[in-house]
Amino acid sequence: MFCLSPHQDRFRVAAEAGHAACTARLLSLGADPSRGASGGATPLHAAAAGARAGAVAALLEGGADPAALDLLPEGPRSWLLVQFGGDDEDEAVGRARDFAEL
């Protein structure tokens, strides 16, 4: 169970915690996978940074943009490369999806 302050976004919290089913459900209810927080980080940034493969896969299936940049500017693809490895960012996205299926 989450304890949320009024300012926390449930969608981002679900993605960051790796709750793939909750993330997918929120997407089905119309949550915007590309909506960033004040620093520009999207739920995909949070899931990728935490190596939450199930949430990453749900977000990608729900239309999240793996090339979206935050204010640093960093994107989820760079986090996926760090967390899941591969020769390039596209391969890292594929590896995250494959890992989620295990």
Image (cartoon, rainbow, N blue to C red):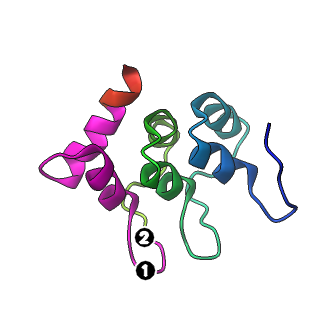
Cα distance between the residues tagged 1 and 2: 8 Å
Q: Which residue is mark 2?
A: 69
User: Which residue extends farthest bottom?
Assistant: 72
Residue ranking furthest to the top: 102
Name the quarter where the C terminus is drawn.
Answer: top left
How many marks the image carries: the answer is 2
Q: For the residue carrying disc 1, how many other residues have a C-alpha within 10 Å: few (<14), some (14-19), or many (20+)?
A: few
**Circle 2: residue type:** Leu
Indicate whether 44 appears above or below 40: above
The image quadrant that residue 98 belongs to is top left
Circle 1 sits on which residue? 72
Q: Position of residue 20 (x, y in %)?
A: 57, 32
Q: In this rendering, which labeled residue sits more in front, label 1 or label 2?
A: 1
- Discs 1, 2 touching: Cβ within 8 Å: yes
Q: Secondary structure at mark 1?
A: loop
Let me know if residue 34 is in the magenta part: no
Query: In the orientation shown, which residue stands out farthest toward the left?
Result: 87
Left/right of residue 45 with respect to residue 24 in the rendered view: left
Tell me what residue is drawn at x 44 percent, y 55 percent.
Answer: 49
Query: From what the image shows, is residue 45 above or below residue 59?
Result: below
Going 53% across and 39% down the picture, which residue do you hit? Answer: 62
Q: In this picture, which residue range is highlighted in magenta?
A: 69-97
List x then y, in percent, for residue 73. Answer: 39, 77
Secondary structure state at the residue bearing disc 2: loop
How packed is label 2: few (under 14 Cα within 10 Å), some, or many (20 or more)? some
Residue 12 image position (x, y, % from top left):
65, 53
Q: Main secondary structure of the magenta part?
A: helix
Q: Amino acid at mark 1?
A: Leu
User: Percent x, y for residue 92?
Assistant: 25, 45
Kindly identify the residue that appears in the image at 55 percent across and 60 percent down.
42
